[in-house]
Amino acid sequence: MGITEAQKKQLDEQGCIVIPDVLSDEEIEVYRADILRLAEEEKQNGLARQHTDGYGQLVRWLVNKGEMYEQLVARPKVMPYFEHLLGPDYTLSTLTSNIIDPGAPDGGYHVDSVLGSMPEPLPSFPLVANSLWLLDDFTPENGGTRHVPGIHLQRIKPPPGTTHHPDEVRLSAPKGSVFLFNGAIWHSAGANRTDQQRIALICFCCRSFVKPMFDFVHHIKPEVVERATPTMRRIYGFDSQPQPPDRPTR
Ligand SMILES: O=C(O)CCC(=O)C(=O)O
């Protein structure tokens, strides 16, 4: 297990890579059923985070929604890719799932938080990296993630409302694989022209000095903190809080 020199080069130059065979068929089945259950529950409770005109739904805060999601984040097969992009002390920014329903149109191009609120030119090195853990085969027809390989090297953001790029690629990759990318790659979910939902788990990470989107340190459940290994504590951001805890002096 690890990352080869060729894979590092691909991440540096293309900004994205498919890591095959990360999840087993059994795991895919369990995760997929649970995400659909949670999505339905959140709709019933009025807590659903829908997007793309109601054709997409995010299920958020997965670290608090079952031990099986905790195990996901520290997979030895995937960590070396994050380490290459973000350094050995990277932290989690969000852990969610994105469901794209039949009929969904193309989403809008974006770069990931915090890059969207930074001025251009964007930093010359990766600040954030995203990973989609495919619970379905992704195809250009069913919402396979659209992305523009190599565009991170231009250090620019998509102008608001950008929906297409001449060099865009629609992701084709088998379920169980992980599509991992520099958050400076322009990307968005694609249109789903099939009659089946397309689902991915999304593990989004950042450098340790970047403010994560979710405040795990203050909002993960006590039992999750209790179970956390030193590596998991670091990933949740406990090690990158202002150190040491101090009081203001006069
Ligand atoms: O679900 C997808 O295909 C894309 C997700 C995405 O755009 C994101 O996580 O920023």
Image (cartoon, rainbow, N blue to C red):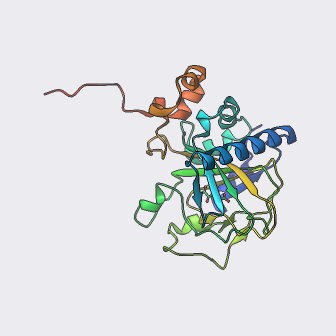
Residue 208's place in the image compared with 181, above or below, is above
Nearest the eye: 105 or 203? 105
Q: Report ligand 1 position as a quadrant.
A: bottom right
Tell me residue 182's x, y (percent): 60, 56
Nearest the eye: 123 or 174? 174
Please state if 228 lies on the left or on the right of 199 as rendered: left
Which residue of the protein is positioned furthest toward the top in this rendering? 226
Please state if 163 lies on the left or on the right of 144 as rendered: left
Residue at point 65%, 44% (across, down): 41
Tell me residue 205's x, y (percent): 57, 45
Residue at point 48%, 40% (across, down): 208
Residue 218, quarter of picture: top left
Which residue of the protein is positioned furthest toward the front in this rendering? 44
Nearest the eye: 82 or 237? 237
Tell me residue 87's x, y (percent): 56, 41
Quarter of the figure that contains the C terminus: top left
Residue at point 52%, 75% (across, down): 161
Residue 143, quarter of picture: bottom right
